[in-house]
Image (tube, rainbow, N blue to C red):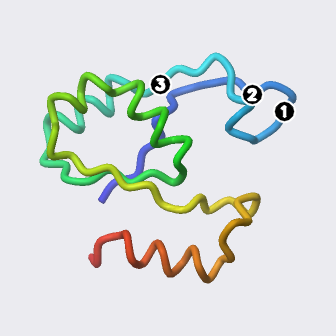
């Protein structure tokens, strides 16, 4: 299992940490594309649906070459994501992540 950020660099407007305030986004296209193509990646996990949507858009060509690649969106760990309590998030992560 590996962890990577799909954004190589960006700026945020208004000094806010909200994903909606990301501007001038440069994705980590080369590195992540190389990892997906050169390694037997079975599943990519995302820490929010926002990130999953951005990945699907930015890597659509790679995804078309890797039809068996499974994409799984985990509940956002952010405390601002209040639709689920922490214990519910932990349960959901345990259900979705592999037992290593």
Which residue is at the front of the view, 37 or 85? 85
Name the residue tied to disc 3.
27
| Element type at mark 1 | helix
Name the residue tied to disc 1.
15
Residue at figure coordinates x 57%, y 73% from the top left: 89
In this picture, residue 36 sits left or right of residue 5? left
Marks 3/1: CA distance? 20 Å
Question: How many marks are shown on the rendered structure?
Answer: 3
Q: Is 83 situated above or below 67?
A: below
Marks 2/3: CA distance? 14 Å
The quadrant of the rendering that contains the N terminus is: bottom left
Residue at figure coordinates x 44%, y 55% from the top left: 73
Name the residue tied to disc 2.
12
Whether residues under marks 1 and 2 lie with C-beta atoms below 8 angstroms apart, the answer is yes
The mark that comes first in sequence, 3 or 1, is: 1
| Element type at mark 3 | strand
Q: Residue furthest top?
A: 24
| Element type at mark 2 | strand
Q: Residue furthest front?
A: 83
Image quadrant of residue 67? Answer: top left
Which x, y percent locates residue 66? 16, 36
Image quadrant of residue 65? Answer: top left
The quadrant of the rendering that contains the C terminus is: bottom left
């Amino acid at each position: 299992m590996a962890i990577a950020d799909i954004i190589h660099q960006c700026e945020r407007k208004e000094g806010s940490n909200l994903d909606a305030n990301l501007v001038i986004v440069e994705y980590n296209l080369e590195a992540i594309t190389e990892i997906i193509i050169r390694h037997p990646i079975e599943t990519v996990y995302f820490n929010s649906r926002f990130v999953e949507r951005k990945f699907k858009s930015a890597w659509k060509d790679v995804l078309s070459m890797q039809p068996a690649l499974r994409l799984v969106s985990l509940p956002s760990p952010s405390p601002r994501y209040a639709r689920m309590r922490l214990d519910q998030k932990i349960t959901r992560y345990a259900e979705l992540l592999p037992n290593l």
